[in-house]
Amino acid sequence: MLSQAIVEFGGPLKELETPTPVPQGTEVLIKTANAGVCHSDVHIHDGHFDLGGGNKLPLGNLKLPHTLGHEIEGEVVAIGPDVKGVKVGDRYAVYPWIGCGDCAPCLRNEENYCVKPRQLGCSSGIPGGYATHVVVPHQKYLLDYGKTAPALAAAYMCSGLTGFGAMKKVGKLAEGDEVVVLGCGGVGMMGIQFAKALFGKGPIAADIDDGRLEAAKKAGAKATYNSKDPANAKKLMADTGGGAYAVVDFVGSESSFAFANSIVRNKGSKIIIVGLFGGAMAMPLPLYPLRALSIIGSFVGSLPEAQEMMEIVRAGKVDPIPYATRPLAQAGQTLSDLRAGKITGRVVLTP
Ligand SMILES: [Zn+2]
Ligand SMILES: [Zn+2]
């Protein structure tokens, strides 16, 4: 098998040829057809996450060489002796947020919060999809994507699931409860579509860019507000009769949090932070209980959430996002382009 591997943090990826694995036990060998390139791949390639203000979060134990790629779609080409119900030739999207199976979060069906993660192509060292083949430890991580374009099915495993997992944290709405999608980039746009499917009505959209707000409106947002103008926070409060029940912040910056905090209902509301833009916030502690305010972080989604999301996707309730494909050999160039902000939409590698 061939892979485009990190051999030096921040350096060019190198094509490595290694023996193609033979699946054991419950393992399934997938021949990669599509591997999405995600912005977090850039950080893992750098060897650290940037926390802003010159602070870095290093990726402690990641050993090189390492193969990135956690948005994977492909064909089953071999199965271990204990695999049932999956056959050679079938095509699936692969849930990559795999846990150890033994810890409390895993037993709670929240593998994405595992204390000993085995996530494919991330920072725990398990090889991912920038390769001709990937080993998946169990068939339960293979998801049927129906008639969805295979490249998009791959992208749903991270950007889609991030939007869906965040929306699930909103919970149930009562009549009159409004949800705001703050930040209408790629993942936020996924959030808008999943909000429609989960809540039966379009969310409110807010962004600092009028072009993105127009796209949000087209995607089904019931109202849009430009969050650059603080007067719009007052307008949103008035229009919603006292503020939103929940704001899902797909930006995660100091200014987006400040905006979110200024548009939620005074009591019992939620701010769900998804974006990783960076910065810090300070709030007097008594305000949390007095306002019964929940501030929740959201990281991708669980396997049951991925299954629920794919039901919505298979039912054709989610519009396709823009994407382009490139050959696997351009993986390194694609990371550089993403780092330089030269890419809009999703790039999917096709080994
Ligand atoms: Zn990702
Ligand atoms: Zn675990």
Image: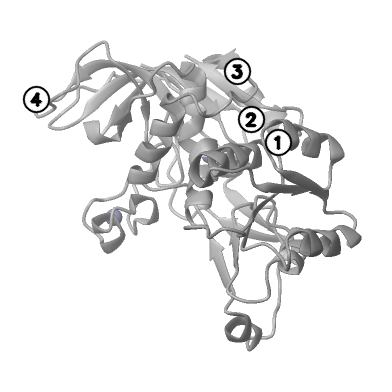
Q: Going from the N terminus, do you reach mark 4 or mark 3 first?
A: 4
Q: Residues within 10 Å of mark 2 (few under 14, many from 20)?
A: many
Which numbered tag is attached to residue 335?
A: 2
| Residue plotted at (67% across, 32% down) | 219
Name the residue type under label 4. Pro
What's the distance in space between the residues labelled 2 and 1, CA to CA?
6 Å
What's the distance in space between the residues labelled 4 and 3, CA to CA?
35 Å
Q: Going from the N terminus, do you reach mark 3 or mark 2 first?
A: 3
Dot 2: element: helix
Between marks 4 and 3 in the image, the one whose residue lies nearer the viewer: 4
Q: Are marks 4 and 3 in contact (CB under 8 Å)?
A: no
Place of residue 132 in the rendered image (x, y in percent of width and height, measured from the top left): 40, 17
What's the distance in space between the residues labelled 4 and 1, CA to CA?
42 Å
Relative depth, front residue between 164 and 317: 317
| The residue positioned farthest toward the front in the image shown | 175
Name the residue type under label 2. Leu
Which numbered tag is attached to residue 81?
A: 4
Dot 3: element: helix
Where is mark 1, residue-wise? 339
| The residue positioned farthest toward the left in the image shown | 81
